[in-house]
Image: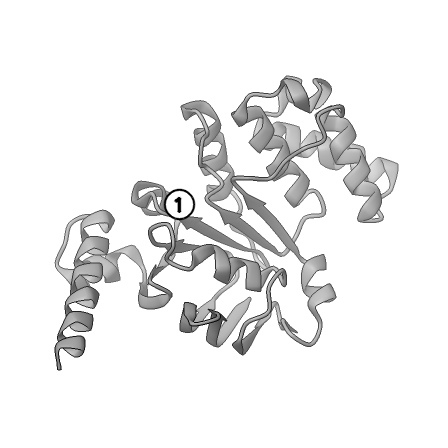
Amino acid sequence: MLELHDITKSYGTFQALRGVSLTARDAEVYGLLGPNGAGKTTLLRILATLLRPSSGGGTVSGIDLLRDPEAVRRIVGVVNGGMGLPARLTGREVLRSFAGLYGMTRAQTEARIAELDDRLELGRTLDVRAGEYSSGMKQKVVIARAVLHDPAVLILDEAASGLDIFARRTLLDFVQASRAPGRLTLYSTHVMSEAEEVCDRVAILHHGQLLTVGTLAQVLEATGERSLERAFFELVREHDQRGEAARAV
């Protein structure tokens, strides 16, 4: 479903990504983990074809990121913590307007809205104007909008940020239920407990470099730690110590 080869991204002298290579399979929830500034969002924007890498490349569901970005966009849905909604429109109106952009018929649209209402517990958000939403209500509609066209690849970039406990629970349950043949969910977060709950495999980024990739069990075994959070800190500590030693030489 996803293959990346030696992806780099530079802004002047600053390197946001340093030779990132990874592979993700279908029917998988793949975690992209790291602190703020690790390069997670930059990598996901490249995957969504919103940015071009400085070097490297890859494919999404067999489609080349650089040669056919429009085709990639048709099979990808994106959610991040800062997406907005038109304040004057209700959730239902937002979804209907986007369905038109995707070329969905009225019957397809209404059936899909009903399905997402059930899965995301949209409830009254469908018929209330977005300007009156809480952060949780807003994020539910943002997620529904991103998956309205049933994308093969769903990118969730800090999607749980700012959500209350009920909305966060709905999101995590939705991610858990997203596994299916021909589908991939990329789940980016700095909250390790979320990744422990929903991710099949994780990739840990730090200062734009990929520190490790594996299942939770593999990461814990490699570090000798009992939790993903502790394993993360151990990997970061080892990386920083190697960097300090190299600079000293």
Residue type at the position of mark 1: Val
Instruction: Tell me: 37 left or right of 8.
Output: left
Name the quarter where the N terminus is drawn: bottom right
Q: Residue at x 55, y 77 (%)?
A: 57
Instruction: Tell me: 225 left or right of 137.
Output: left
Name the quarter where the C terminus is drawn: bottom left
Q: Position of residue 158 (x, y in %)?
A: 46, 44
Residue 126 visible in rendering:
yes
Q: Is residue 236 above or below residue 54?
A: above
Q: Quadrant of residue 13?
A: bottom left
Q: Is residue 102 above or below residue 97?
A: below
Q: Residue at x 57, y 58 (%)?
A: 181
| Crowd class of label 1 (few under 14; some 14 to 19; many from 20; radius 10 Å) | some
Q: Quadrant of residue 160?
A: top left
Foreground residue among 26 and 146: 146
Q: Position of residue 161 (x, y in %)?
A: 44, 36
Which residue ends up furthest to the bottom in the rendered image? 249
Q: Residue at x 16, y 70 (%)?
A: 244
Foreground residue among 229 and 43: 43
SS class of the residue under badge 1?
A: helix
Q: Which residue is mark 1?
A: 198
Q: Position of residue 210 (x, y in %)?
A: 34, 67
